[in-house]
Amino acid sequence: MKAIILGAGKGTRLRPLTYFINKILIPIYDKPVVQYGLERAKQAGINEMALVVQEKDEDWWRKKVVYFEDDLGINIEVLADDKWATAGMAGAVYVTKDFVGQDNFVVIPGDNAFSADLSPTLNSFEKGALVHKYWVEDPSRFGVAVLDANEKIIDIVEKPANPPSNWALMSPHVFDARAFGYIEQLQKSARGEYEITDLLKRYLSDNELQTPTLPGQIFDIGTFDSLMEANNFFKNSTKNT
C-alpha cells in the first residue's frame, strides 16, 4: 500500500495564518500537523508516500520533505499540479495516478491529525474502498452518512446544510487502483470540485464500501476552534505519556 498526503489546499478559513505559513505546516503542539498523518502511515508499515502540492510550491516542498524523510525513514515524492490538485479532494487524488500504479493506497489530508493507531483498518484492506465513520457535533463541515432503519449507510451527502446524521465520513480514505478510472467519470459538483464523496458513492453503489468506526480522536484543522482543540489535546496527551 502507498500513502497519498494532500497539501494543495489554500487554507482560506485559517487566514491570516495561511498568508504566512502553509496550512499543513501549522504547528499542533510540538510538530507540524502533516507529521501526524505521516507518522500514522509509517506506523502502518507504509514507506512510499506522495505529497500533492500546487505547482508554485513544488521546489520549496522538495527541500522541506527531506526533514520528514530523514526523521521518519520514509520516501516522499512531491507531485505538483494546478489543474487537478485544487479541483477538490478527488481531483487531488487523481494527480497520483502514475505514482500509485496498480497498488492500493490510503489518502490522508495533510491538515488532519490522528491520535490512534490506524494499522488495523489499513492493513486489513484488500479491495474496494474504505472510509471511517466518526461521530461529530458539526456534521455540516463534512461528508455525512445517510442511514437506513438498521443504521446501514445507504447514501452520502457532502457538507449538507441539514445533516441527515451526526456520522461524518472521515479520512483516512483507502482505495484500490480502480479509483482513478472512476474519478475520470466524475462530474464537478456545484462547488466546482471533484468530490471524494462522489467517488465513495461509486463504490457504495457496488456494495464495495467499508465503513469502520475511526478509533481515537481526529482533528480536521479547518477552523481556529479545531486548531485550538487539537493543540490542547496533544499537549495533554504528551504530558500523560
Image (cartoon, rainbow, N blue to C red):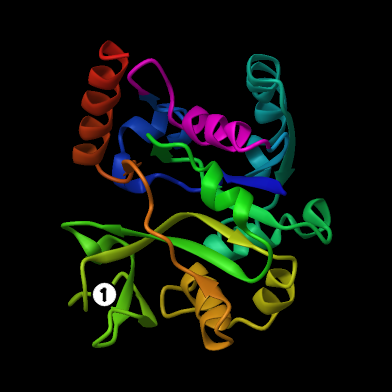
> The disc labelled 1 sits on which kind of residue?
Pro
Left or right: where 232 falls relative to 103: left
Instruction: Say whether residue 31 is magenta.
Output: yes
Left or right: where 140 falls relative to 219: left
Q: Can the viewer see residue 84?
A: no
Q: Whole-percent x and y of residue 140?
A: 23, 66
Residue bounds of the magenta highlight: 28-45
Q: Classify 119 as above or below 170.
A: above
- Looking at this view, is 117 or 48 the one in front? 117
Q: Classify 14 as above or below 127.
A: above
Q: Residue at x 26, y 18 (%)?
A: 235
Left or right: where 74 falls relative to 11: right
Q: Which residue is drawn at 67% across and 78% down?
A: 182
Q: Classify 99 as above or below 71.
A: below
Q: Whole-percent x and y of residue 238?
A: 31, 16
- Looking at this view, is 41 or 76 the one in front? 41
Q: Is the magenta stretch mostly helix, strand or loop?
A: helix
Q: Residue at x 51, y 68 (%)?
A: 196
Q: Whole-percent x and y of residue 40?
A: 53, 35
Q: Whole-percent x and y of residue 151?
A: 28, 79
Instruction: Say whether residue 29 is magenta.
Output: yes
Q: What element carries label 1?
A: loop
Q: Classify 8 as above or below 236.
A: below
- Residue assigned mark 1: 160
